[in-house]
Amino acid sequence: MPPKLLQEIRKYNFFILLFLYGCKSDSPKLIPSQTMPTDCWYRQWEMFFKVENSFYEEASTEFVKLTETDCLLNPKVFSNGLFAMLKSGKENEANPLFSNGSEEDKRAFCFAYGKEYDKLCSEIKPEIVSKPYLRDSILRLYVRDQYSRGGDIRQLIERYNMDTTGLSMLLYRDSDHENEEHLKKLITTNGFPTANQVGKDGMDGVFYIVQHSSDINWQKSVLAKYEELLNDGSTDKSMYAYLSDRINIKLGNAQLYGTQVKNLHFENNEVEFFPIEDSIRIDERRMAFDLEPLEFYKKLILKAYSGRFNDVKK
């Protein structure tokens, strides 16, 4: 896959670069309060894709309406909605929304648009973690993993002022196995990382390295750990969904969350997924695990791979 294409995919931060592979695992029980009204879920992702299609005025109006409801917005959606307001010249309205946003919302916005709106993000402090040495070790593996796939690693390096000495020699190797072995040793020594210990970026790094591992038994053990963390709300639910689907596909089973794509058919704007269990209820499961509606996921994939978003937006 061309590096430029992978960079385009990573821009949207939906883990799409993971979909080309795919655990038969029972879905963990979801506490009712973890879900949201279907209308809230659909509207926010509909607004998100209006931003991606540069309909900033329309998207900013919808974003304001959403902030006036009880809908709990995904941080990526909050980030895009705020960006739409700023692009529409509504700085005076956008600034208080940013100030009143959660730390996670603010970080999501500043991660995506901080360079363009550095003044707004100037007071956002680095994430405090209890094990910075462990985070930094994981981030070095994460950078290598992403670089080898054509990902844009500059933001990570700049954010943590990373020392890249000796790193460039490792970047061009087939590094998945080496990353896997390093991470296994870190987990043996320190236990399985938590967000409090290594932060969001550190947990993202763990996820990608595990997702790209060829050791399915290790992947299954990590999936079980993710399920434990889901129960106390300390992990990203979408990570569980992607890893679960990947293991399922490797085992020859149907996937539960529709994250793994088999083929793209650009002639008729169709996305062919690996088999999906109980496909009629796929969006119920996607909503429960913080994923966008399947129809929007398809659009995002087609845009990333063909640039035909205007052709498939409907």
Image (cartoon, helix red, strand yellow):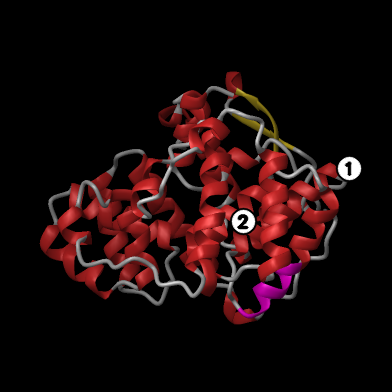
Q: Position of residue 254 (x, y in %)?
A: 83, 47
Residue 56 seen by the camera: yes
The main secondary structure of the magenta stretch is helix
Foreground of the two, 51 or 79 = 79
Identify the mark at residue 206; answer none if there is no mark: 2
Residue 75 located left or right of residue 259: left
Residue pictured at 59% horizontal, 68% vertical = 235
Identify the mark at residue 44; answer none if there is no mark: none
Question: Which mark sits nearer the N-terminus, 1 or 2?
Answer: 2
Q: Is residue 226 magenta?
A: yes
Q: Quadrant of residue 177?
A: top right
Q: Residue furthest right?
A: 252
Residue pictured at 73% horizontal, 68% vertical = 225
Identify residue type, mark 2: Val
Is 201 situated above or below 37?
above
Residue 145 located left or right of residue 40: right
Identify residue type, mark 1: Gly
Residue 310 located left or right of residue 220: left
Q: CA distance from mark 1 to mark 2?
A: 25 Å
Q: Quadrant of residue 187?
A: bottom right
Is 181 situated above or below 153?
below
Q: Is residue 13 magenta?
A: no
Q: Position of residue 274 (x, y in %)?
A: 77, 39
Foreground of the two, 67 or 239 = 239
Q: Position of residue 17 (x, y in %)?
A: 59, 38
Q: Position of residue 218 (x, y in %)?
A: 80, 55
Identify the mark at residue 252; answer none if there is no mark: 1
Q: Secondary structure at mark 2?
A: helix
Residue 258 seen by the camera: no
> What stretch of residues is rendered in magenta?
225-232
Q: Secondary structure at mark 1?
A: loop
